[in-house]
Image (tube, rainbow, N blue to C red):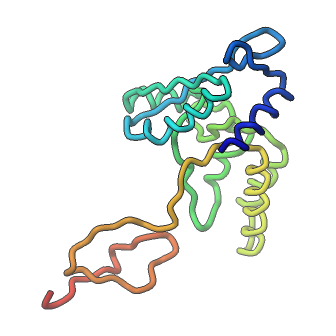
Amino acid sequence: MRGNLKKAVMLLRQAGWAMKNGVLTRTADGVPLEFEILLVSKDFERIVQPFVQNLARIGVKAHIRLVDSTQYINRIRSFDFDMFVGTIGQSLSPGNEQLEYWHSSRATQPGSRNYTGVRSPVVDALVEKIITSQNRQSLVAATRALDRVLQWQFLVIPQWHIPYLRLAYWKTLSHPDKAPLSGLDFDTWWMTPGS
């Protein structure tokens, strides 16, 4: 982590920020670097807190703001946030939803899911290519290209990932040995006779 913090300080310095009395400030006007992280559940505080602590080590002040679900939804829909914890759900066959997530036409449209506000002709073209793909090969190529372009813009901060699903179930239930790629499908489970 120490190496990442050093790199962050170097990049911030190059972007016009400097440490002053333990606070990272913009050299042009002395404004401190601080922002709010919007949360809808107290459960996420333990996940966000290490991030906030690491930011504090380099002089950045991040405020955690816990709000009720109605306020959270309204603020997200109206883009009234600096940062929030959320997900951008994807399918195995991306399509029209990518327009909502990444297209420039949705960047300032209240209620859209272009939470990052990304506006890029390259991203727009790739989203349109995904939507109009005529075959799987074209869809996969366009989706991979969009993924690369978005990753290099550093629009989101991934927080966690586990490569497995945690599930508790009764011994009386059985399921296929091979699960569908899309996750659990309880319609394929059955009661084991005699158990």
Q: Which quadrant of the figure has residue 62?
A: top right
- Tell me where residue 81 appears, x and y as whole percent: 57, 26
- Tell me where residue 142 appears, x and y as whole percent: 77, 63
The residue positioned 79% from the left and 60% from the top of the image is: 145
Relative placement, left or right, of 33 versus 79 is: right
> In the current view of this chain or complex, which residue is farthest to the bottom?
194
Is 54 above or below relative to 176?
A: above
Q: Quadrant of the N terminus?
A: top right
Front residue of 153/26: it is 26
Front residue of 21/51: it is 21
Front residue of 169/181: it is 169
Is 157 above or below relative to 178?
A: above
- Tell me where residue 71 appears, x and y as whole percent: 42, 26
Q: Quadrant of the C terminus?
A: bottom left
Q: Which quadrant of the figure has residue 94?
A: bottom right
Relative placement, left or right, of 52 versus 22 is: left
Tell me if residue 80 can be seen.
no
- Tell me where residue 138 appears, x and y as whole percent: 77, 70
